[in-house]
Amino acid sequence: MEIKITQFKHSDLVTLKGRVDSSTAPKLGEALNGIIEQGRYRIILDMSGLEFISSAGLRVLINAQKTCKRYNRGEVVMAAVTPNVYSSLDLAGFTVLFKIFDDLLLAVGNF
């Protein structure tokens, strides 16, 4: 799995490529926690290159969402979610917990 973080004025873009499973989920958790520890709570996940996400990856995402939404500070949104990953999110009931945008530009414009 590859993680690339781009910092914008009002948000942070996390670009994911590859697979998020039990062996790579801690790396994703560290990346998201690093952003949050800097006091930045508006996170966009670019999932256009993500092939698969396991329950361990979903756990990391929901923990980041809870932390960002606490005290109404921000949120985690998703952009360009592939059909395979979207079906996993839908099956787990995560589509109602996250804003999902078709286009990366719309997600950045959300903040």
Image (cartoon, rainbow, N blue to C red):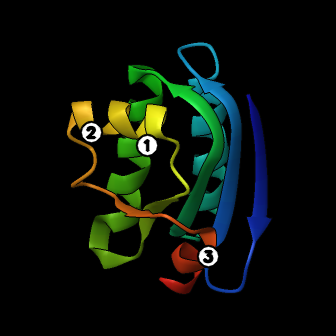
Q: According to the image, label 3 marks what residue?
A: 11
Task: Name which of mark 2 and mark 3 comes first in the sequence.
Answer: 3
CA gap, disc 2 and disc 1:
14 Å
CA gap, disc 2 and disc 3:
25 Å
Q: Measured from the top left, where is residue 4 in percent x and y? A: 79, 50
Mark 3 element type: loop
Q: Is residue 42 above or below residue 86?
A: below
At a point 71% along the width and 86% down the height, the residue shown is: 9
Graded by Cα atoms within 10 Å as few (under 14), some (14 to 19) or many (20 or more), the crowding at tag 2 reads few
Q: According to the image, label 2 marks what residue?
A: 90
Which mark identifies residue 61? 1
Q: Are marks 2 and 1 in contact (CB under 8 Å)?
A: no
Mark 2 element type: helix
**Is 21 positioned to the left or the right of 55 in the image?**
right
Give the farthest residue toward the front.
83
* On-image quarter of the N terminus: top right
- Identity, as a three-letter code, of the amino acid under mark 1: Leu
- Identity, as a three-letter code, of the amino acid under mark 2: Asp
- Identity, as a three-letter code, of the amino acid under mark 3: Ser
Q: Measured from the top left, where is residue 56 in percent x and y? A: 44, 22
Asked whether residue 111 appears in the rendered view, the answer is: no
